[in-house]
């Protein structure tokens, strides 16, 4: 039997889909999330993330940048994920608040952000302890 992803998860069972085109930012943030006992799937753009989900990939939370190369941006990815995978929590990050309407996402992280802040937001949404308390 496949576990219900809506049940309380042990952090080691929680999966974050990290969608970020900046390689260094993605790698460093992925390392921080893994250090917090989370499983991390990395995608370089929205197309990769969408292909992962559509092929049966699992995620409890998606953290996505807005502006990325490819056929869609993070806002279109958010729209598709919300429509087809409503159980996935969504965190959007951008240097421009403009494209995100409150209520469309579970959290917004304005750039630049600290990795500690990003991990805290993810842990709070997943239901784990934050690094700061």
Image (cartoon, grey):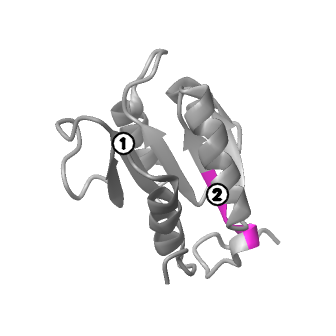
The crowding category of the residue bearing disc 1, from other C-alpha atoms within 10 Å (few below 14, some 14 to 19, many at least 20), is few
Residue at image x 49%, y 77%? Answer: 132
Percent coordinates x, y for residue 56 in the rendering: 71, 44
Q: Which residue has dot 1 on it? A: 112
Q: Is residue 15 magenta?
A: yes
Which one is earlier in the sequence, the residue at label 2 or at label 1?
2
The quadrant where residue 24 appears: top right
Residue at image x 37%, y 33%? Answer: 66
Q: Element at badge 2? A: helix
Percent coordinates x, y for residue 113 in the rendering: 39, 49
Residue at image x 61%, y 82%? Answer: 8
Left or right: 113 in relation to 27 = left
What's drawn in magenta, residue-wise? 12-16
Residue at image x 52%, y 76%? Answer: 130
Q: Element at badge 1? A: loop
Percent coordinates x, y for residue 29 in the rendering: 60, 47
Location of residue 49 with respect to 88 vertically, above or below = above
Q: Which residue has dot 2 on it? A: 33
């Amino acid at each position: 039997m496949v576990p219900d992803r809506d049940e309380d998860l042990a952090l080691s069972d929680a999966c974050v889909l990290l969608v970020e085109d900046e390689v260094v930012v993605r790698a460093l943030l992925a390392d921080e999330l893994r250090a917090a006992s989370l499983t991390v799937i990395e995608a370089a753009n929205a197309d990769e993330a969408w292909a992962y989900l559509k092929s049966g990939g699992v995620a409890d939370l998606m953290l996505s940048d807005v502006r990325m190369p490819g056929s869609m941006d993070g806002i279109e990815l958010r729209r598709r994920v919300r429509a087809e995978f409503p159980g996935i929590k969504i965190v959007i990050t951008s240097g421009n608040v403009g494209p995100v309407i409150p209520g469309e996402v579970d959290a917004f992280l304005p750039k630049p952000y600290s990795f500690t802040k990003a991990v805290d937001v993810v842990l709070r949404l997943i239901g784990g302890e934050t690094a700061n308390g």
